[in-house]
Image (cartoon, grey):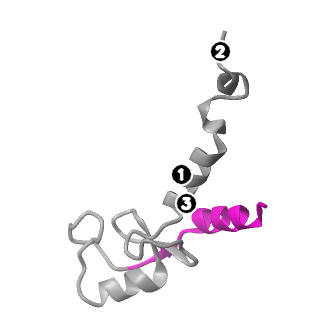
Amino acid sequence: MGSAASSQGGACNDEQHDAAFLQSLFCCPILKAAMVDPVIAADGHTYERVAIEQWLQHGDISPVTGNALAHTRLLPNVLIRKAIACQQQQP
């Protein structure tokens, strides 16, 4: 027999754990705060646009990996933006 959690769809149903996980996804690694305008840099990581733009004014090194970025173009992270909006709509 499985536990109550597994009978309800698995351990991922722990709402507190899920909320903490989502908050970590929505947190800018530079600001350590929730993102409003998430963008993807060449290192594949997502940052708050204003924070990474300011970071890139001082060089082309990834704030997460410490490696040189192949380019400094930033792309909107539409998936994270939508996920943030969905979470904000929940009670």
Name the residue tied to disc 3.
23
Amino acid carrying label 1: it is Phe
**Real-space Cα distance between discs 3 and 1?**
5 Å
Q: Is residue 39 left or right of residue 6?
A: left
CB contact under 8 Å: marks 3 and 1: yes
Residue that appears at 60% across and 32% down: 11
Name the residue tied to disc 2.
2
Name the residue tied to disc 1.
21
Q: Circle 2 — which element?
A: loop
Q: Which residues are magenta?
A: 73-91
| Quadrant the C terminus occupies | bottom right
Graded by Cα atoms within 10 Å as few (under 14), some (14 to 19) or many (20 or more), the crowding at tag 1 reads few
* Residue 46: x %, y % from top left: 45, 67
| Quadrant the N terminus occupies | top right
Find residue 90 and report its image quarter: bottom right
Residue that appears at 34% across and 79% down: 72
* Residue 21: x %, y % from top left: 53, 51
* N-term mark: 2 or 1: 2
* Residue 75: x %, y % from top left: 49, 74
* N-term mark: 3 or 2: 2
